[in-house]
Image (spheres, coloured by chain):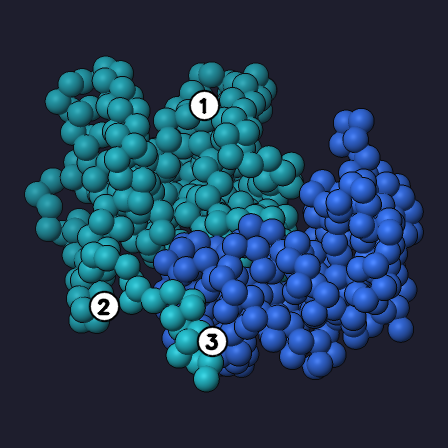
Chain colours: A cyan, B blue
Amino acid sequence: MRIASRGIPLLLAALAIAYPWLVPNYYLVYAGALTVMYAAMATSWNLLGGFTGYVSLGHSAFFGLGAYGTGLLVTRLDVPWVVALVVSAVLVTAFAAGVGVAAVRVRGASFVIVSIALVSMMNLVVQGWRSLTGGSTGLQVPSPFPGLHRGQTHMVFFYLFLALLALALLVWWYVSRSRFGAGLRAIREDEDKAESLGVPTGAYKVTAFSLSALFVALAGGLYALWFGSLDPIFVFSILIGSYMVLMSLLGGVRHLFGPLLGALIVAPAGEYFLIALGETQIHLTATGLVLVLVVLFMPDGILARLTRRRAGPSIHDQSADQRLQEVTP
Amino acid sequence: MTSLRTEGLTKAFGGVRAVDGVTVELRDGLINGLIGPNGSGKTTFFNIVTGMIRADAGRVLYRDRDITRHAPHRVAHAGIGRTFQLCRVFPRLTVLENMLVAVRRTRLRELLAGLRDKGEVERARHWLRRMGIEHLEDAEARDLSYGQQKLLELAAVLMAEPDLILLDEPAGGVNPALIDRIAGLVRDLNAEGRTFLVVEHNMELVMGMCDHVIVFDRGAPIAEGPPSVVREDPRVLEAYLGV
């Protein structure tokens, strides 16, 4: 068991690093980079969703802001791309903290609505502010690697996204082992009870919300540099946010590798449908349908199914009084 | 020394004054009972004291510090712990994780510390042993029996090291053997210096365990004193029996 739990991730990591060299063409490198990007974003989403149970459909707001922030810093201020990426992500995280203070006051369905409203607002702002963002015609961002041809750029970004994914996984893992993480999980289980035990739930939620926005913003920034052209309708779409939710739920929100597994299934499937069916809206319908099915029949995800321990109660069936009779003379 | 003092605490839900100008004072080191008919405002009083609902008027002081509008986690940090009427644990966390949720101070170093922090785990095991449920530390809380969950809830509250513990119906829904055990624990914890305020309908338990009893009726205290005195008080008999 231990060998399996240590060995399999190592093997997968080695496979991921070798992937661009194993596939026969650059299209598959591109599809791989896209998948890894989604995996990083879903893992990041899971810092909030998985620990606290707050389902945000609006994380594409941070993706879009990270993308536009990076793009604007590069095009308008001629900032080096690495600096633009980091500065933009930090600004988006600060913005998320501000939004979080207001957003995490409401729970359950209300929070979902607030998160959707956030994306719609950002979309309107970016489209409306033509002088700065180029509006609905989009923003062109010069490639940071003008010397490389398109396929080589895919390779570079594949590894950049892979590094981001590793970072997001590392942070999730670290939080899951910390007392902060225990507090976040307690919020998911019973927020008022956690508060009564001294957990500052508001501060915890805002921290998780911002942390979760950080890696999504970094992914957005990398996306801007990679694609070189930003379309507000796409980067601020509910679809990207829904993908993060679907991938996490499908793989399993309570597991480190759940969102990654979900991304490995959903992202290639999306690309496949795009090729097989052309530019139709069918993949949107399919995404919605799969999301409904997962929530209805497999809310704990694939990994929960696979790692479920032996059937029956996990402790022997012994009531408190039986136990009492043992300890009281 | 005064442990908890409230002054003119009032809370209305719609037109009903659930808590109506409550002024009470608890002395440090006693087991205090809070009794009264259903709907007399006992749980609302608990909720106001612990910051879970806001009073319309009045003040809450703990050891002469005003904690009236403090958020629940700050009330907990001040040294007040509570259990709930319908026992509340974190169902999908393990017993040990349940214990490690409690936060005594908001310090970055404490929050970033690992869950396997030796000192904290040792403290958790100590309390689980005292409750007699240490053998369950790796089980998920939802797999425990109701009685075991009650013991876990109390153990988790003790992890926050409160000086004053509010118990909302500790004997509710548990069997006689466990009631005796819980009563024994409360007496031991009290002997170690912790103050208690216990809401309970089991009169035998209240009268046998408490040093001081406060009686609520229609949102306000109508009598208080040692159990033997309160038991004979005509106002108390009237509130309970309607005679």
Residue B55 image point, x, y percent: 81, 42
A262 or B149, nearer to the observer: B149
Q: In which chain is the residue bearing label 2?
A: A
Which residue sits furthest bottom?
Answer: A329
User: Residue A6: which disc?
Assistant: 2
CA separation in Å, label 1 and label 3: 60 Å
B181 or A316, nearer to the observer: B181
Q: Is residue B47 left or right of residue B19?
A: left
CA separation in Å, label 3 and label 2: 35 Å
- The relative height of residue B54 versus residue B124 in the rendered view (above or below) is above
Q: Is residue B151 visible?
A: no
User: Residue A243: which disc?
Assistant: none
Q: Nearer the viewer, mark 3 or mark 2?
A: 3
Residue in the image at 18% along x and 69% along y: A1
The residue carrying pointer 1 sits among few (fewer than 14), some (14 to 19) or many (20 or more) residues within 10 Å by Cα, namely many
Which residue sits furthest front?
Answer: B243
Residue B215 image point, x, y percent: 81, 53
Q: Secondary structure at mark 2?
A: helix
Q: Is residue B150 left or right of residue B213?
A: left
Q: Amino acid at mark 3?
A: Gly
Q: Nearer the viewer, mark 1 or mark 2?
A: 2
The residue carrying pointer 3 sits among few (fewer than 14), some (14 to 19) or many (20 or more) residues within 10 Å by Cα, namely some
Residue on which the image places disc 3: B132
Name the N-terminal-most of marks 1 and 2: 2
